[in-house]
Amino acid sequence: MDDIQGILNAMMRTAVDPQTAAVAIAVIGLNIHFGYTGLINIGQSAFMLLGAYGFAISITQGWPLPVAILVGLAVAFVFALVLGVPTLKLRGDYLAIVTISAAEIIRYVGRSGGYESLSNLTNAAQGIAGSQYRTPFTDLSPFPTGTTQLLPFNYLDVAGGSTVVRLLGWLVVVAAIWTAVRIGRRKVGLEGSTRTLAMVGLTALVVVLLFFLAPVSQRNTGVNGWWFTVVAWILVGISLIIVLGLTRSPWGRALKGVREDEDAMRSLGKNVFAIKMQALIIGGLFGAIGGMMYVLPAAVQPDALGRSITFFAYTALLLGGAATIWGPVLGSLIFFVGRVFLIGVANTYLSSDDYLNIMNGQQTSQFAFIIVGVALMLLVIFRPQGILGDKRELRFNV
Amino acid sequence: MSETTTAKGLADPAARRQLMSGVEPEPGSSKPDPILKVDNIVRQFGGITAVDVDHLEVQRGIITALIGPNGAGKTTFFNLITGFDRPTSAGRGAHWSFDGATLDRTSASKVAKSGMVRTFQLTKALSRMTVMDNMMLGAQNQAGENLAKCLIKPFWSAQEKQVEEKALALLDRFSLLEKRKDYAGSLSGGQRKLLEMARALMSDPKMIMLDEPMAGVNPALTQSLLGHIQSLRDEGTTVLFVEHDMHVVRHISDWVVVMAEGKLVAEGPADSVMSNTAVIDAYLGAHHDTDLGDDALLSDATLEQLEAEVAAEEAEREEEQRS
Amino acid sequence: MSRTSVLERGVVARAAAFLVLSLLVAPLLLLLSSRSVEAATLCLPKKDETACIAGTMGSRAEPIEGVDVTLTKPDGSTETQTTEKDGKFAFTITEPGNYLVGVDEETLPKGSELRPPANAALRGPEGTIKVDNVQLGQNYGPVLTVRPKGFDDSTSKWDEFIQSSVNGIRLGLLLALASVGLSLIYGTTGISNFAHAEQVTLGGMVGYGLVNVAGLPLVVGGILVVIICGFTGWFQDRILWQPLRRRGLGLTQLMIVTIGLSLAMQYAFQYTVGARTVRVVVETPETRDFGSIRITDQSLWAMGIAAVVLALVGLALLRTRIGRATRAVADNPALAQASGIDTDKVIRLVWTVAMGLSGLSGILYALIVNGVKWDTGLQILLLLFAAVTLGGLGTAFGALVGSLIIGLVVELSPMVIPGDFKYAAALLILILLLLVRPQGLLGRPQRVG
Ligand SMILES: Nc1ncnc2c1ncn2[C@@H]1O[C@H](COP(=O)(O)OP(=O)(O)OP(=O)(O)O)[C@@H](O)[C@H]1O
Ligand SMILES: [Mg+2]
């Protein structure tokens, strides 16, 4: 049971991690590209990296925080234009190829020492240490110093942390999630504001219960502390609200139209190029925000924001459900938590003398990634609509 | 000649006949009030010349049919003038204008915005969107499609209401009202044709170009579709349509343009053009002695047989859906 | 804080003392050299106070001793340092502005001269090197390397050009081996196969296993690699792609399946051999010189094999029944099927051949770059896609042409831009081409409506 609680605690720490939230924001952007508009952008990591560079370098140059954020966004904006102009008039494959190439180029350039003036800013492959740009953000923290545990009242306080209480708690969590998913997929006869209310209520219940069952203790303001966590998840919330507004508007309808058939949209007098460009930019800006949030608790390292992040983002998006509002967040959570779960299980049961010892420490994390890759394949093959997607949409392939 | 008088007066068949009687039944003849003028459009694919039109004018306010054997270049011609393709002769004398405005370098979406809306031979329904959403996309100048305004609902909610009402009215007219919440991808082939036409009408086009609108639509519905097309004309919309069914062509068109191997071979009123030797040559080759407009080719018996087949198909499909 | 300023004072003092005393007390200094040199070369820029212009005369591997390095300041005054055993020089700068770094030709080793920077914008007057726009708080490292004197710049550029071109063609041929398959798969099935790069890595990895670990002769190993990789193609189509075609999975979904496969394969490589570079053959390859071109035996063989195999594939596509059928399927699968071609069989063959070819490409690549790593394929994925797109998606011969162009661009671009940016150059070419000829070099535009 201690083994399991250890894995659960690690999973919970990942679930609240600001970097998970950061990737979720990038996935929300990717959802606008891929889910709603059908743009196959395989370079979301580049938007993240550019946002991060723009932000971090601005601060190391002594510019104030808001300006730095704007610079990060501006860089992503320009990048979207550069990618979009040559490719958005062409078939989708070209965007895929150009975005994946461009993302790699950005990474190469970032880690290159070839031009002095550039590597002075980016510090080449070593990257920019978080301590060089984090301070203005940390200084904003309204939290007192110290450490806080969420929840302070947790399973340990009930019947001495007995297994029965914990099992019961987890059962409730599973039931609540199951209900929420059913509501999310409109399987339960709830509509409109009741539905939203039920979703919010269930989500709150699950969150509280999770913190009760696997309490997380962090410093308030330090790197990766609660201040980072709170800001990151608030950003996720704001992003969701924006996307909700966008996709429920006629503009969002036009995005879907472009995804379904560009020529039909042209014949209806829509400027397809402009719509795609707008979508690419908006999604890219979310990517940049995700990138800034991603590096705040860490460092700007070009290799950390490479192709794998994009692939993870796709896995998360498809897992949650493309073209759904909650899909990106749900998918990112499940993806990262699931990965920690796999690594935890592999470390505990496959790489220890107590149980099986068939792989070494490094192999456990690679093992987890192999599973991720296979899971991505199986997911696309057997459940391409993800957890929240509408099965009806699948009957007609485009 | 002022636009309004022509448009108003054309609901009367006699007026139309009167209008077109002055036009010479020759390929490329000039019309009293052309809405579309085309010069020198050539399109080659590798070695073959798909379209090679010297001059064509389409009269405003009437129904013009564009006919020709398979591969004559009708669809390619549509693509060219609606901006979906570029003529090989672009920059070398190719020139076409719609309602007075030059279209030589205009993109497909601008062409549609200027009031010339087309449908596709192979329908382009937006599959993973509802029928209603398909319709809503057809409306022009929606404030809510502007990224800057779309987040603030008051900017567009009133217009959205209007568009919605219009969409419902059109769906009703095209017997698609019950389907409005279904995904467009679940519609049958004929229903898609209807949807596409209804969607095109959402923008109140000045001219609508239909590429084989009746293909795959059952005869009963064809009848009502023809009614729609005629009433469109009566309301002042110019119609240019491609059709293989000579019966239909003869029934509703005021003027017929015939293409073969990319060239215009004949023009004229429906009755006379079908007995034109050039046209018969184009369709049947040199050895023939049939009049294409001859109803013997499309006798009632054949029609009935067709109808029965369609009905059987329809029933089959319904069964499929039930299972 | 105070520690650095002490150090700086030490540096200045040392420089002055060195100039005056070097002739008189050289033996003494030599005794102390190990300590004093370290202190001397340590220049730490301080925010808003000082900057450093520092570097090594020669290269780190072959530093040059006793060279007088002169710094010309914005006001025209100069400062000179003589390099020690480690070749290092370090100037502490207190004024921002434009600086020049030069060397005293007399003090260079006999018969050699300072190599002017490749980037013409960095060339200063009288053979100096520009260090422009120096700002306080930063480090600057001008590159001071030497070359034989009387080195004729034009012929050297020319030689470099020839050598790079040969390398470019070599890379192009190996890329072509993989990209022809990628293009055929795209043409016949519509899949953009992102796992193709991993198939290249697989070729190298299997080669490592068979030749290096199991000790098979290289030729036998090579043939086995092609067979095994071809089999993986056959097998993939059998258990994955064909069933998915039957299910009618959309192309975007298929593409993401390939991404998943690529991810799984990458980590499977890491799982089995780790993150290190492994070599197919352990011995260092023999090199040959043809005029100014230097090339390894293995490279020669690799180029020969690649050229012959590509020619065979091309001939097969043009002359044999199955080749023509393949092109027909790539052209229009529905039509091909209707005219009696068994498209499934053709596609199965395409997968098999494509994977065999990329396996071959992988082992040859591993031989010429001296090893293979889990991300070897990933590094050239970009080039493969660029090549295929450049040639026109789905056209086999286009892929060949595109590969050669990309290979040349990648190898030639370091003559004008830093090596790190050579992939960026390839992408730039691609983007420019897409702007003017979206269907690629040999592609055809699509039909609408
Ligand atoms: N993108 C293309 N590439 C090559 N050839 C094409 C292309 N588009 C059309 N063609 C050729 O141009 C010719 C005219 O085709 P088009 O589709 O315009 O005929 P159509 O008159 O519409 O025929 P149908 O009545 O059968 O619809 C045909 O021979 C066709 O094969
Ligand atoms: Mg046609």
Image (spheres, coloured by chain):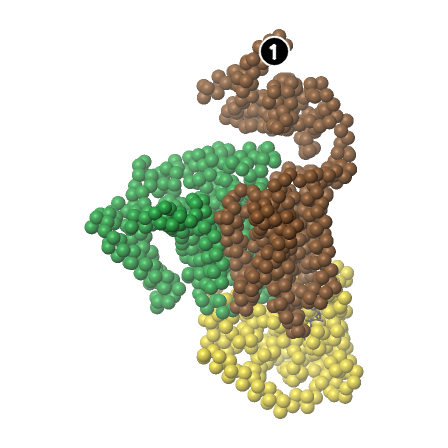
Chain colours: A green, B yellow, C brown
10 Å neighbourhood of mark 1: few (<14), some, or many (≥20)?
few
Image: A177 above or below B71? above
Measuring from the top left, give residue C248's x and y in whole percent: 54, 68
In the image, taking residue A219 as reference, residue A118 lies left or right, namely right
Label 1 resides on the chain identified as: C
The residue lying at 57 percent from left, 58 percent from top is C232
Q: Which one is in front, A24 or B81?
A: A24
Q: Is residue C48 visible?
A: no
The answer to which image quadrant residue A226 occupies is top left
Q: Residue furthest right?
A: B286
Residue pointed to by mark 1: C26
- Position of the C terminus of chain C by quadrant: bottom right
Measuring from the top left, give residue B295's x and y in whole percent: 68, 89
Image: A270 above or below C279? below
Q: Which one is in front, C51 or B39?
A: C51
Amino acid residing under circle 1: Ala
Measuring from the top left, give residue B14's x and y in whole percent: 66, 83
Image: C301 above or below B120? above
- Position of the N terminus of chain C by quadrant: top left
The answer to which image quadrant residue B266 occupies is bottom right
Q: Residue furthest left?
A: A159
Q: Secondary structure at mark 1?
A: helix
The residue lying at 44 percent from left, 65 percent from top is A390
Q: Residue furthest top?
A: C24
Q: Is residue A203 visible?
A: yes
Measuring from the top left, give residue A94's x and y in whole percent: 61, 55
In the image, taking residue B216 as reference, residue A311 lies left or right, namely left
Quadrant of picture, ligand 1: bottom right
